[in-house]
Amino acid sequence: MGIEIVQVDAFASAPFTGNPAAVCVFDELPSATWRQNVAREMNLSETAFVIRREDGAFDLTWFTPSTEVDLCGHATLASAHVLWQDAHLPLDRTARFHTRSGVLICQREGDWIRMDFPAERPTATVATDTLVDALDHTPVFVGRNRMDMLVELENEAAVRAASPNLHALGALNIRGLILTAAADEDRDYDFVSRFFAPAAGVDEDPVTGSAHCCLAPYWTEKLGRDTLTGYQASARGGFVNVEMHGDRVHLLGQAITVMRSSLLVPYGDS
């Protein structure tokens, strides 16, 4: 019997959309080296490792193919989905995860999952020549939080058409770059975004929950509403509903299991 790995499309209303994440559930914590090797083997934006705690909660870590990260939304969504789907947790129970970014809480709401995450507000900063050259574009706004850089462009078309220099972005000493703009008037969402993280081994992430911890406070302040819908305009694409609650952001999304497999390498073999 191998170790089961479940692959889930997160922030997805149909298979093969949204952002795929791999999820493994354990009773004890495998080594960081082993987890990193599994993530490299899966070669997805993130692989999540869920470990049961005696108090009924779970420890949760996330790895890209090249590094462990401090916060990941879509793999948290996928992890909660797997816990309920595979009866690791009763359907009426809240999923409580202990992570590098504190305690994250997930609750089922019909076909949706509501996640309680920290708000990661951006602080305005200067658009350096290096950034402008990497984007080949002059930003409307540039901000930073503890993980990422947020860049607003002049319109949705500019975000969709952007082709940043990934090598230059990898030298900016950030986890990733969030490109964003207000949605065109005829859209059924409020803002659009894309996310690039070459320094973390992910050239472009399909749908990034943690980026919306920055996008939510930014756009709620600009648009004057606490409940918004974002669309991440990657090739796969996906919607993220966001709600501001003080210094917390609620992210709402759906998830679909698309694959199950067995890993035949024991914990200690790396």
Image (tube, grey):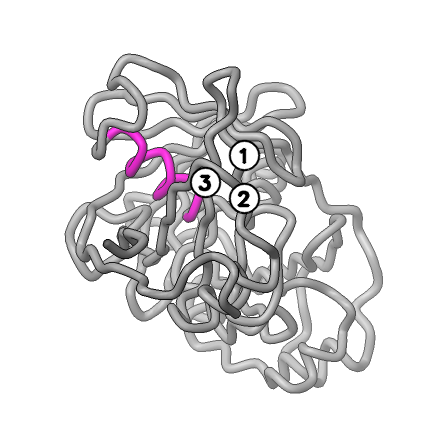
Q: Are marks 2 and 1 in contact (CB under 8 Å)?
A: yes
Viewer can see residue 226: no
Q: Nearer the viewer, mark 3 or mark 2?
A: 2
Q: Which residues are magenta?
A: 75-84
Q: CA distance from mark 3 to mark 2?
A: 8 Å
**SS assignment at label 2:** loop
What's the residue at 45%, 40% (across, down)?
Answer: 50
Residue tagged 3? 50
Mark nearer the N terminus (3 vs 2): 2
Checking the image for residue 8, the label placed there is none
Left or right: 231 in relation to 223? left
- Corner quadrant of residue 43: bottom left
**SS assignment at label 3:** strand
Mark 3 Cα shell of 10 Å, populated few (<14), some (14-19), many (≥20): many
Residue tagged 1? 59
What's the residue at 70%, 58% (across, down)?
Answer: 141
Q: Are marks 3 and 2 in contact (CB under 8 Å)?
A: no
